[in-house]
Image: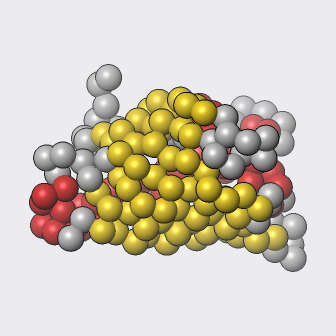
Amino acid sequence: MANFHFITNWKIDAPVNQVYEIIKDSSKLSEWCPSVYLEVKTLEQGFPNGIGKKVALFTKGYLPYTLRWNFEVTQIIPNKKLALDAYGDLEGKGLWTFTELSNGGCEVNYDWNIEFKKKGLSAFSFILRPIFEFNHRWAMKKAYISLLLEIKRRQGVLNVEAPPAPTFYFG
């Protein structure tokens, strides 16, 4: 089967509204997380609240294959929830949830239910499942590191290091 279900949990020492705004602003993904998001293009802005926004992505993980996929924002509850439908090399649903913690930080959860559709690889996903799972975990780890760096930059911390660069990409 080419179906995957990933759940990612992050605890972040920053206000929920700050983290939510960074993740919600898809136009900046390739700037603050270039190891995963090679190109990001907004196709449609959607409604003023962000629902209906359509975005095209060119992404990769650790391994030397790339994915072209799009998403459409299907639900937004500011500072609480952001849902999307994905299609292209990946098809399925993603749900970001944001919870404010008593220490002023937040917990971020990403629930990602997808089917791997990339031609040439999807037929072998039952064999390659551990490799695809490793690749996803690597990408989410780099996204977490990059998000923490972006939070520092936005908080005005000086001399913040550059986010991790993509691996095995010569484009």
Question: Which quarter of the figure has residue 144?
Answer: bottom right
Residues 31 and 72: in front is 72
Q: Whole-percent x and y of residue 93?
A: 48, 62
Q: Residue at x 80, y 51 (%)?
A: 18
Examine the rendering and report whether any part of residue 163 can be seen: no
In terms of depth relative to the viewer, which is nearer, 32 or 98? 98
- Please indicate, yes or no, whether residue 64 appears anywhere in the rendered image: yes
Toward the top, the furthest residue is 171
Instruction: Say whether residue 129 is left or right of residue 66.
Output: left
Eyeballing the image, is 88 above or below 136? above
**Nearer to us in this view, 73 or 150:** 73
- Which residue sits at x=79%, y=41%? 48
Q: On the rendered structure, is 168 left or right of 58?
A: left
* Image coordinates for residue 131, horizontal then vertical, percent: 24, 61
- Residue at image point 29% right, 57% down: 116
Front position in the image: 151 or 113: 113
Residue 171: give x, y in percent of width and height: 32, 23
The residue lying at 67 percent from left, 59 percent from top is 75
Q: Quadrant of residue 149?
A: top right
The N terminus lies in which quarter of the figure? bottom left
